[in-house]
Image: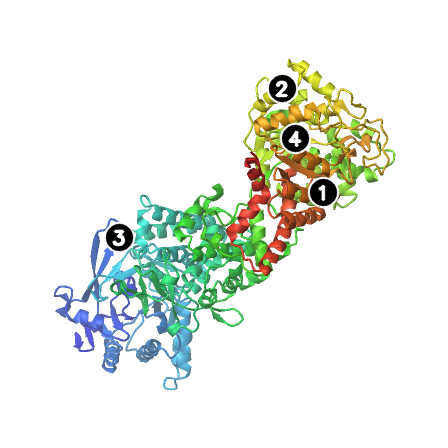
Amino acid sequence: MSTSSASSLVPSPNEVDCLCIGSGRFLRSVLVPALNAAGHKPAVIQTRGRTFLDYCAAGAVGDANTSSDVPLKYEVDVVEYDGTVATQIVDCWGAGTLGTEEGRDEVTKLLDQMKSISIIGVGVTEAGLSGPTSQSLIHLAAILKKIATLLSNNSLTCPNPNGKVCVVNTDNVPGNGSVICKYLLEIAKSDDSVTSFEDFLRNRVTFHNTMVDRITSQRDGSGGMVPRCEPVPSKALVIEDLDADLPATFSSQELKSKYGVVVRAQSGQLDGDIALKLRVANGTHTAVAHVMALSSLLMTDALAKEKGDEKATTLMSYLDSYFLDQILVAASDQFGKKETESVYEDWRKRLCHPKFGLSTFFITQNGAAKGGIRIGPTIRDLIQSNETVAVTTAFAIAAILRFLTPAKPSRNAKNSIYRGWLDGHDRESVVVPSGSSDGETAVYADGLRYNLAEGWYEFRGSCNCGNKTRPICELLGAFGTTKQPIEYLAPIKAYLSKEDGGNLGDIIEEGGESANNFCICVATLYARMVAGDGILAILKELLGKDGSGFSADCKSLVDGISPTQLDGQVPLHYRQGAVPEGSNLLETSVGTKPEHIASIVNAEVGSVMAIDLHTHLLPPSHGALCSWGIDEILTYHYLIAEYFITAPAEVTPEQFYVMNKQDQADVIWKALFIERSPISEACRGVITTLVAFGLSKEVEARDLEGIRRFYIQFRDKGLSGTEEFSRMVYKLAGVKYAVMTNVPFDANEAAHWRPKRKEYPDQFRSALRVDPLLAGDRKTIETTLRASGYDVTIEGARQYLRDWCDTMKPDYMMASTPHNFVLRDGSKGNLADVDKRGVNKEAMKHPFAFADVISPDVTCASSCDGEGDTVASIIDENSDFLSEVLMKVCEERDLPLALKIGAHRGINAKLRQAGDGVVAFADGNALARLCSRFSKVRFLATFLSVNNQHEACVLASKFRNLHIYGCWWYCNVPSLIEGITTMRVEMLGTSFTAQHSDARVLDQLVYKWAHSRAVIASVLAREYTKMVVAGWSPRRSEVRRDIVRLFGGSYEEFMKKSLS
């Protein structure tokens, strides 16, 4: 017997055994078809309106709905992957409404006529489950009361296995069944009319927790009555049934394969499904939707073009990497790798459906909370398990925050609605829309709009953060204009800490390295997005960043440094810059706060590629002359000298030097690293280098043999291993190229240049060492000329030098002056009458040696500074070798002459190279006379004594052909670097080169630059702060320009300077 009225339409009420409360598209496209397939006969009862009832009453599907012998029918469109639309006809055994009193009465009458009740489906909005005062829940309680009465008097039966009515929800409220149960129990307790209702709810009703997942929209022009769906996914409806209360048909293979119904009988399984859905499907959806919306890509089906569209390709590469490198890594242990991969495989196919997409703006709703719910768990697991947090994850959070940034500062916006600006549009221009394109304004959600032509969109504020508990959008909008990343760090951490934000409060508060790097990385990417770099352009850039692509660690995009590292004490290792050339962020002010300025300066110093304009390195192609390895580091002359300070009296230098290299290294390791703390700069440098090589555990264990094993892996490969090691060192040190010291007067090295020059990488550049010419050493020069087949004449010497310039192609000529280097007037000729008692000719020919002016037989008092020696001057201002050979060729070839001034050789000759000292007050006037006398020759100069540094700055300010560089040898310690650099900045601005390594062992590039960068950054931070206080606020590009100059740019400018 059918019942039909203005408020219901039920063809066969006694056959109905399921009620669906609500008429949402998901319920009609998933639950109702599944109930039919399971052998049930459901009726759909609308909660408020009557549109579905009217749709059925109008006989929308043929004439079927007018017959009393068959069920009602409605249509569901399924959009297949090839674009075809399959329209399914779904049976429905009744339609009604709870929106009117008459409609509620009709539902009561229906229950009286029903013979059995098995399933109650609930398909209301999230607002409908908001609390016990919700009308939807009040109506559901009334229905269940009626069912309780009918069951108690046997007017109605429940055929389910355990006799319990099963309530199945079809929304994605977490723990939805438990939520409904909780609120209904509260309603039951407040209602005295049915004393046993609470017991009935507890004992005769099962409220199943569920997960639903099928993307649905509506057929155009259907008024929402015809669901438009994607093909059924593998888990369209997952139901938790721990006590087997559902009908057995729900576990059938047909329901699983055709309708995506999965029943979970074990505790925790549904939680796993939900967690995976949130992390995988919802997480990637959220990660990409904000990016697409900001980029004016309106529908997710744009991703289907990944094989032919650059934007789609980049976006899907981003999502694939986010899944593989982040979600899969974080979820595999908990949910299983295979299951996690299966979920993504299914979701990826759905996401790339070419004919079925969702509005990207629609997905962005409540983005602040979604960041924590969908992305936060992955971040938490990665950090807690010490896994890499990649730039993709930071990018996803940054994109959410960018979307939630209003175009202008706002407070207490009307209805909490704020206006943002789309990528590619000027922030200021969208503050007040022009109104010229109102016809293009579209609504994407309740009360929220966008206009692509005018470049604006609306969003709702949420997630109150900060001390004043303002929405995160107001905190971000309060900045008004673009700032540097460090300034955004506080509000970003506040957002990530909030429960309705990132929900990572404990992780952020703990402040581990990974969490800090992640926060700063988010700030860096967010700042660039706000600056207008282009969100898709940034994404494409990340894809190819440093060869690691999207999988790069967040630390690769850390801009700045933590406050604890701003004092120059922590090594500042090179890392690729987080803000690339061309970024709009470079044209933003560095701000006014000292800590912000310091952070930016550290970022720029840490990422600048240094030019090491003087070293004693040689390339791997030069075989044994290329010095590298732990034993070479430990036997460096700094450490030999330090060892002999406290060496036992019975250990003499002679005994030490007859040992092989490894035994020497063992002795020094034991004395300076085991028996004493390696606190000196030279010892600390060894530690810094080893840690940078990833040998922290070996260092901690004091395991020298373990350290040696690290090097063996390179040595075992021969030349290719040395080349590999060299490339690694240069990369870690951040050195663009290093200038070698090449000695043509040494046969060992000359063999690598002639008869055929050996090829070597561009990272090595040559400098031609010419100490004998500067010293006027006639015997060494004439012997060399004869042996090489040149005329023993001035022109022969010139040609010898020219030919070596052609062979080596040096950047400059160079020499180290003896400790009593002077230029005097009055002497004539070619130094034939000069006494050369102090010249150590063998030392002058030794590779990398300096011109010794003290014989090993000469004893020098501890106070010796060169002034009291009886050694004759070995250079004359009018020397032919100086003026007619060296300077002549320098002018011809436009080559500078580099001078290192102030070494006192062999003050303890028994220590060999470790026995050299310093001239306390070298004669700077000699340099002044050279610059004046040879005004067309460029001079590079560095002084060894700290006492000469002020004079050097003054000279550099007087002679345009003079460039001061580096903190040489005994000045290359942090305390002196700090003072010397400060003085140079104050006197010369940026017209000098802050440092050179003077490295003799390849490994030393790592620590010498890391230590120097830290100190120089500390100095520059103070100097820029003083400048800002004075009233000049630099843009970041200006700071970068200055730092590039100080780390080699000024040197290259000087090398190109015209002196004609």
Residue 951 versus residue 255 in the image, above or below? above
Q: Quadrant of the N terminus?
A: bottom left
Q: Earlier in the sequence, mark 3 or mark 4?
A: 3
Alpha carbon of mark 4 to alpha carbon of mark 2: how far?
16 Å
Q: Is the C-beta separation of discs 4 and 2 under 8 Å? A: no
Labels in figure, total: 4
Looking at the rendered image, the disc whose residue lies closer to the viewer, 1 or 2, is: 2
User: Pointer 2: what residue?
Assistant: 800
Instruction: Name the foreground residue: 891 vs 847.
Output: 891
Residue 443 position, x and y percent, is 29, 65
**Any mark on residue 971, and which?**
1
Instruction: Name the foreground residue: 519 vs 110.
Output: 519
Instruction: Name the foreground residue: 38 vs 1022.
Output: 1022
Looking at the rendering, which quadrant does residue 66 occupy? bottom left
User: Pointer 3: what residue?
Assistant: 355
Q: Label 4's element?
A: strand
User: Pointer 4: what residue?
Assistant: 814
Q: Earlier in the sequence, mark 1 or mark 3?
A: 3
Three-letter amino acid code at the position of disc 2: Tyr
Instruction: Name the foreground residue: 690 vs 936.
Output: 936
Looking at the rendered image, the disc whose residue lies closer to the viewer, 3 or 4, is: 4
Residue 232 position, x and y percent, is 29, 55
Q: Earlier in the sequence, mark 4 or mark 2?
A: 2
Q: Is the C-beta separation of discs 1 and 3 under 8 Å? A: no
Q: What colour scheme governs how the chains and residues are painted in the rendered image of this protein? A: rainbow
